[in-house]
Amino acid sequence: MLLALMNWGDRWYAEPAGPPARIHHLDCGHDTHAVPACAHCGEPLTVHNTTQLPGPGGGVGQGTRVIGPLIAARESHGAAGSGPE
């Protein structure tokens, strides 16, 4: 999680000279960055190969007026496995 937050800050708030810190992978000796990957198959996650579905604690309520109904509609239309609309 911290690496993802660093990537976001480096992309949107880094000074012209570059980011304030680098992530260095000790095993291979190279600088790197976080890459979100599927916990099941290991493939990189992108906006093009993922969608959002309701979770077990999800529901429509305060603070979910916009996103709650959209996600619920995807579940009711059998969107498991479909990409972005």
Image (spheres, helix red, strand yellow):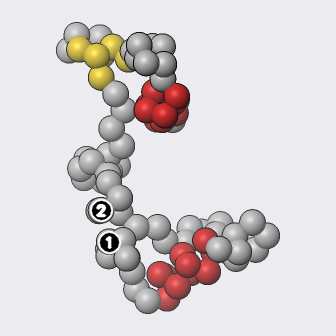
Relative image position of residue 35 (x, y in whole percent) = 33, 38
In the image, taking residue 55 as reference, residue 11 lies left or right, namely left
Secondary structure at badge 1 equals loop
Query: In terms of image quadrants, where is residue 49?
Result: bottom left
The numbered dot on residue 49 is: none
Residue 31, above or below 63: above
Task: Report if the CB atoms under discs 2 and 1 are less than 8 Å apart.
Answer: yes
Report how far apart the C-alphas of labels 2 and 1 lie in the structure. 6 Å
Q: Amino acid at mark 1?
A: Gly
Residue drawn 23% across the image and 50% down it:
43
Q: Quadrant of the C terminus?
A: bottom left
Residue drawn 32% across the image and 52% down it:
45
Which residue is nearer to you in this view: 10 or 42?
10
Sooner in the amino-acid sequence: mark 2 or mark 1: 2
In the image, taking residue 11 as reference, residue 64 lies left or right, namely right
Residue drawn 30% across the image and 62% down it:
48
Q: Amino acid at mark 2?
A: His
Secondary structure at badge 2 equals loop
- What residue is shown with label 2? 48
Residue 34, above or below 24: below
Relative image position of residue 64 (x, y in whole percent) = 69, 70
The numbered dot on residue 83 is: 1
**Residue with the most extreme bottom position:** 77
Tell me, yes or no, if residue 27 can be seen here: no
Relative image position of residue 30 (x, y in whole percent) = 23, 14
Query: In terms of image quadrants, where is residue 21?
Result: top left
Q: Is the residue marked by circle 1 packed among few (<14), some (14-19), or many (20+) residues within 10 Å?
A: few
Q: Is the residue marked by circle 2 packed among few (<14), some (14-19), or many (20+) residues within 10 Å?
A: few
